[in-house]
Image (spheres, helix red, strand yellow):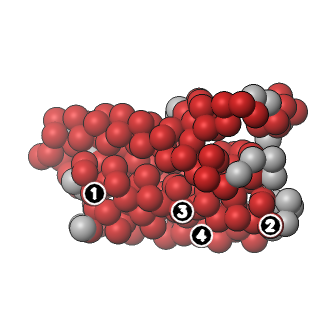
Amino acid sequence: MDAFLLSTAVIFVAELGDKSQLMALTFATRYRFRDVIIGIIAATSVVHLASVAIGAVIGAQFESAQGTISVIAGVAFLFFAAWTFRGDKLNDEEDTKAERNQTAVIFAVAFAFFLAELGDKTMLATITLATQEGWLGTWIGSTVGMVAADALAIVVGAMLGKRLPEKAIRYAATAAFVGFGVALIAGGLS
């Protein structure tokens, strides 16, 4: 349960203002909520399952060095804070991809999200969490956190067709990552 709650919160915050959340908003201005959310759930489930598998393997190999892993995870979260502060934008090519293929919306959304999440900060955060937490709770929690954040963007996109106020979201997400990072480093050093 701890792994579920922690990963839900961390990934929800990580996804705020992320490129894939902007993709969700863009898809939502053109397609039905149900189709967009099903595509996101499918892609997120696969990417985060792979992420926890990677993290579980790393965690099992370095179980005796949990303090070091906590410090490394804390540094990674500080990196995520810097990445979040910098922000993500959809470029013209990504925006065009979001507009195409109305006959297979679910597959288009799933494929776009799958590609967007490979190597993204939420994938890296999930790997990091899985090194220290249970894989099942981390997988379910990270998937729920990401889908919840993207659902927020879908609702906003469907209702308003506008972006979330990026600056405020970026600052709040950055502060949360710094908090998680500092806490992990402090825990690893003690």
In the rendered structure, which amino acid carries the disc numbered 3? Ala
Task: Report if residue 186 is visible in the image.
Answer: no
Compared to residue 65, the image places residue 159 above or below, namely: below
Q: To which residue does mark 1 refer?
A: 137
Q: To which residue does mark 2 refer?
A: 159
Q: To which residue does mark 4 refer?
A: 175
Badge 1 crowding class, 10 Å Cα cut-off, few under 14, some 14 to 19, many 20 or more, is many
Quadrant, the N terminus: bottom left
Q: CA distance from mark 4 to mark 1?
A: 24 Å
Depth check, mark 1 against mark 2: the one in front is 2
Q: CA distance from mark 2 to mark 3?
A: 16 Å
In this view, which residue lies farthest toward the front? 103
In this view, which residue lies farthest toward the left? 64
Q: Are marks 4 and 1 in contact (CB under 8 Å)?
A: no
Question: Which secondary structure lies at badge 4?
Answer: helix
Sequence order check: which comes first, mark 2 or mark 4? 2
Task: Report if residue 100 is visible in the image.
Answer: yes
Q: CA distance from mark 1 to mark 3?
A: 16 Å
Tell me: 32 left or right of 49: right
Circle on res. 163: none
Q: Are marks 3 and 4 in contact (CB under 8 Å)?
A: no
Q: Are marks 2 and 3 in contact (CB under 8 Å)?
A: no
Badge 3 crowding class, 10 Å Cα cut-off, few under 14, some 14 to 19, many 20 or more, is some
Badge 2 crowding class, 10 Å Cα cut-off, few under 14, some 14 to 19, many 20 or more, is few
Spot occupied by residue 159 in the image (x, y as percentages of width and height): 80, 67
